[in-house]
């Protein structure tokens, strides 16, 4: 069974170990030589070029993705040749454009922040007036890790983005207790499995820490899982779907973002769940039965390692980090370091949340810029 | 950090996932194209050819092994160039030749079966006379998975091997309760860590099932760990060392075999221990601090999948096996099937041994020829 992954980032990289375990032939179409997923890169080329992607895709049984940026015309060319693509282009379209996502979620009745499509400073100003003078503006495409997202308080606060063309998404600032994330997987024949709901802590718009399961969550996990499963089914998502959610001040849920691929808030599953999100994604896109999503310990904490300015690599710090924390699992993406860039993560698991968190933070501290 | 592995079998293959997790650059010198470890094979060539091995080794920081068959003159050529080799040639020499191993173990006072070096049918006959008319004869080199091992009852029972030249090892038949295995890892700077002692069940000389930890073992685990650590230190072993042992009828230990590499009796650690033997081997040969060897569940059971005659691959059976046992971890080595050949393994973990064993056997049954 041959799986082709478009994109050579750390998500493709982390699909390789479970592919090796299961004896699957995994191939990556990377953007550049020396990508994070270079070990499986059978081709290097431009994922916006249909001929390049087609040549890659003809050699595999199913095409899937490291990111959501493959253009729809390229995806259409694959489908036209009868190549299996998961998630399907129609589903991916919803993850590719935040305006499309808001429209679809609203149509299926999923809880979302109040939002509007705005095409000018005047329209943005009107929204601000209705929502207390502050709102979140997002570019519909291309944003990630806090990029393309901005809190504005004046109508001219997004003029540079308007000048770049196209409408923007504006949303109310949600009064939330915390951010949580529900990751699920769905296979084409319909089976769906959900991991435990997790709490996520963001720093500067980037996922920093993930606690699995979300502590003191009461009825929230059941509601979140039901919501994510419903979204996966309504949108016909195949593979892993991450639903980033706000737990609102009144204890409800509101959908923040969707990602149709393994997601940072699911990295803890590599070390903390029977089946990792990366193995599950491979199973799902191959339409194989899904694996058990149970946690292997009461608590898991995942902390991202962000690159520092001096270009230090994680392995340089292994002698001290491993000696101090022999039980913490270390993950390096073999990416060159840039300030704030995700270059790896650490995961601790165990019986007591306080202890697990302290151990994960101690390990992560060795890798801080 | 670049690790070079000589040999492209499943042990090299299973070193690749932890190398990816840790961001290490792993390269394999494989015997053939399409080897089990092909995804990391940077070279294909003859490991008995010094020039081939040197060209491979010059590009890495440390050389280690998938098997023990690299000739000493080739190893000496690496050392002469200042290339780090772990385990070192002097240690590996003990694992390469069963007569050398018996001599060394006897010299350090490790418990071993009574044995002798025999050069003729007459000498074998004399040993048989002393040991009740039955004994085990082993070829000193090249044996594995029951090959090169034979129970004989007559002096002419090893004439074919004598005719092939060289002395043979003859050993008493040990009256044992069961077979157990102690896997440890040691790094050049001296740190040693041991996994729990496991019980192994052999079928036709091939490891079939492994129970971790060894049930009802009393004081045995402490004695086995101390013995394995002592062997690792006395022989200056670096990397993973597996000590296959008999639990004798009187409750003692007797060393059966040594392997200086990750070992079949340690495969359970991938899914059942904080640090797998494959990650630990990489840490050890790079002289990095060793990882925690604690089990992640009370019980793990590993069962080998042996190839059937019809050449069926494991993935062909995934639809039924995964649907039936979503919690069992499946490992395929992507090797062509031959009767009796190890083509993969399955591991179940959990709270109750009976349950874990039943689940592992149910999963393994889907892959039986």
Image: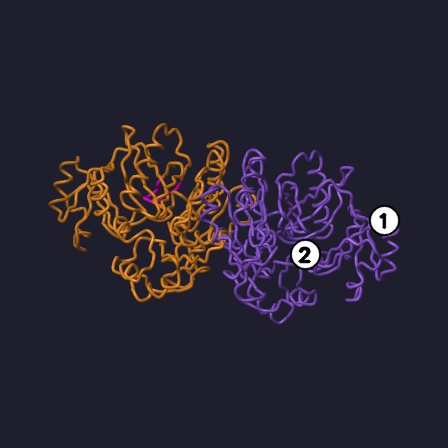
Chain colours: A orange, B purple
| Residue A211 placement: quadrant | top left
**Residue named by callout 1:** B131
Q: Nearer the viewer, residue B164 or B4?
A: B164
Q: Residue at x 79, y 66 (%)?
A: B163
Q: Residue at x 30, y 44 (%)?
A: A258
Reading the image, the residue beneath label 2 is B144
Horizontal arrangement in the rendering, residue A200 relative to residue B115 (left or right): left
Q: Sequence order check: which comes first, mark 2 or mark 1?
A: 1
Q: Chain of mark 1?
A: B
Q: Nearer the viewer, mark 2 or mark 1?
A: 1
Give residue A74's position: percent from left, percent from top.
28, 61
Query: As rendered, which of B133 and B27 lies closer to the eye?
Result: B133
Position of residue B139 in the picture relative to residue A101 (left or right): right
The x and y percentages for residue A84 are 34, 56
Q: CA distance from mark 2 to mark 1?
A: 25 Å
- The span shown in magenta is A202-209
Residue A257 falls within the magenta-colored stretch: no
Residue B288 position, x and y percent, is 58, 50
Dot 2: few (<14), some (14–19), or many (≥20) neighbours within 10 Å?
A: few
Q: Nearer the viewer, residue B168 or A156?
A: B168
Q: Nearer the viewer, residue A82 or A329?
A: A82
Count of marks placed on residues: 2
- Residue A46, labelled with which disc? none
Query: Whole-percent x and y of residue B362?
Result: 54, 42
Instruction: Please tell me if label 2 and label 1 are on a single chain.
Output: yes
């Amino acid at each position: 069974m041959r799986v082709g992954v478009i994109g050579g980032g750390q998500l493709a990289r982390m699909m390789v170990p479970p592919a090796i375990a299961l004896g699957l032939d995994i191939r990556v179409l990377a953007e550049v030589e020396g990508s994070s997923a270079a070990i499986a890169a059978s081709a290097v080329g431009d994922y916006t070029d249909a001929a390049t992607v087609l040549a890659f895709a003809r050699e595999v049984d199913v095409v899937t993705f490291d990111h959501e940026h493959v253009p729809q015309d390229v995806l259409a060319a694959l489908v036209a040749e009868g190549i299996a693509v998961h998630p399907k282009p129609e589903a991916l379209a919803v993850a590719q454009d935040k305006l499309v996502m808001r429209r679809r979620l609203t149509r299926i009745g999923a809880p979302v922040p109040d939002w509007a499509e705005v095409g000018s400073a005047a329209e943005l100003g009107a929204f601000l007036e209705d929502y207390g003078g502050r709102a979140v503006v997002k570019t519909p495409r291309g944003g990630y890790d806090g990029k393309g997202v901005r809190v504005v308080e004046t109508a001219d606060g997004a003029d540079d983005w308007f000048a770049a063309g196209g409408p923007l998404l504006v949303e109310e600032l949600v009064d939330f207790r915390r951010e949580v994330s529900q990751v699920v997987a769905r296979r084409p024949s319909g089976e769906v499995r959900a991991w435990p709901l997790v709490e996520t802590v963001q720093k500067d718009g980037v996922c920093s820490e993930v606690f699995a399961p979300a502590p003191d969550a009461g009825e929230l996990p059941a509601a979140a899982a039901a919501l994510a499963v419903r979204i996966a089914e309504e949108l016909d998502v195949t593979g892993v779907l991450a639903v980033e959610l706000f737990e609102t001040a009144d204890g409800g849920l509101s959908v923040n973002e969707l990602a149709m691929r393994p997601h940072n808030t699911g990295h803890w599953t590599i070390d903390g769940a029977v089946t990792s999100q990366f193995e599950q994604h491979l199973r799902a896109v191959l339409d194989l039965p899904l694996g058990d999503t149970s946690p292997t310990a009461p608590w898991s904490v995942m902390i991202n390692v962000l690159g520092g300015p001096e270009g230090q690599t994680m392995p340089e710090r292994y002698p001290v980090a491993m000696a101090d924390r022999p039980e913490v699992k270390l993950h390096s993406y073999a990416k060159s370091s840039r300030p704030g860039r995700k270059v790896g993560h650490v995961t601790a698991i165990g019986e007591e949340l306080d202890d697990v968190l302290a151990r994960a933070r101690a390990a992560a501290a060795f890798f801080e810029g």
